[in-house]
């Protein structure tokens, strides 16, 4: 049971961090474009307008996905309570991989689509 609790805590770390960064990015995106911290893609770094838009949009996605993933993670771990450490460990590894795809890859794809829908290739807002 101790290993199961450890794995649950470890598996909740990513969605909780994503949720926290989502709140932070939505309310207070990094003030200046920089090469170290923030949502950094070619499109998001066209100008300060695209930079702020990308952070706020991705922040909203991360809040929704992080909240949902916390709940789903707890529910997903329930069937492996009492199983041996190998089963819990393998399930945990698979679940963390799914979390990474859902919380890190999908928001990038969606944010880039939304950037292209709202901005032209030079970073100027379209009349939507």
Image (cartoon, rainbow, N blue to C red):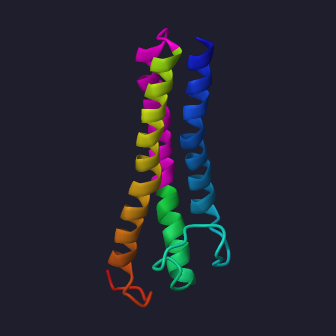
User: Residue 95 location, x and y as percent?
Assistant: 44, 34
Name the residue furthest top: 82
Front residue of 32/4: it is 4
Magenta region, main secondary structure: helix
Please state if 122 lies on the left or on the right of 12 as rendered. left
| Residue 70, magenta (yes or no) | yes
On screen, residue 86 above or below 30 = above
Write the residue at 48% across / 13% down. Answer: 81
On screen, residue 76 above or below 44 = above
User: Residue 50 location, x and y as percent?
Assistant: 50, 79
Write the residue at 36% across / 86% down. Answer: 120
On screen, residue 106 above or below 8 = below
Q: The N terminus lies in which quarter of the figure?
A: top right
Please state if 81 lies on the left or on the right of 12 as rendered. left
Write the residue at 43% across / 24% down. Answer: 75
Name the residue furthest front: 86
User: Residue 45 location, x and y as percent?
Assistant: 53, 80
User: Residue 112 location, x and y as percent?
Assistant: 39, 70
| Residue 52, magenta (yes or no) | no
Front residue of 127/112: it is 112
The mark total stands at 0
On screen, residue 17 above or below 34 = above
Write the residue at 48% across / 29% down. Answer: 92
Q: The C terminus lies in which quarter of the figure?
A: bottom left
Which residues are drawn in magenta?
61-84
> Dividing the picture into quarters, in which one does residue 118 lie?
bottom left
């Amino acid at each position: 049971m101790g290993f199961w609790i450890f794995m649950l805590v470890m598996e909740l770390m990513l969605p909780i961090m994503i949720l926290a960064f989502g709140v932070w990015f939505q309310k207070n995106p990094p003030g200046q474009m920089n090469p170290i911290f923030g949502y950094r893609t070619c499109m998001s770094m066209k100008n300060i307008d695209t930079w702020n838009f990308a952070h706020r949009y991705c922040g909203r996605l991360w809040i929704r996905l992080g909240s949902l993933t916390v709940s789903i993670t707890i529910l997903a771990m329930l069937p492996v309570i009492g199983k041996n450490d190998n089963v819990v460990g393998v399930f945990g590894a698979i679940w963390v991989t799914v979390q990474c795809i859902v919380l890190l890859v999908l928001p990038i794809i969606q944010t880039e689509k939304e950037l292209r829908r709202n901005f032209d290739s030079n970073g100027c807002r379209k009349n939507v």
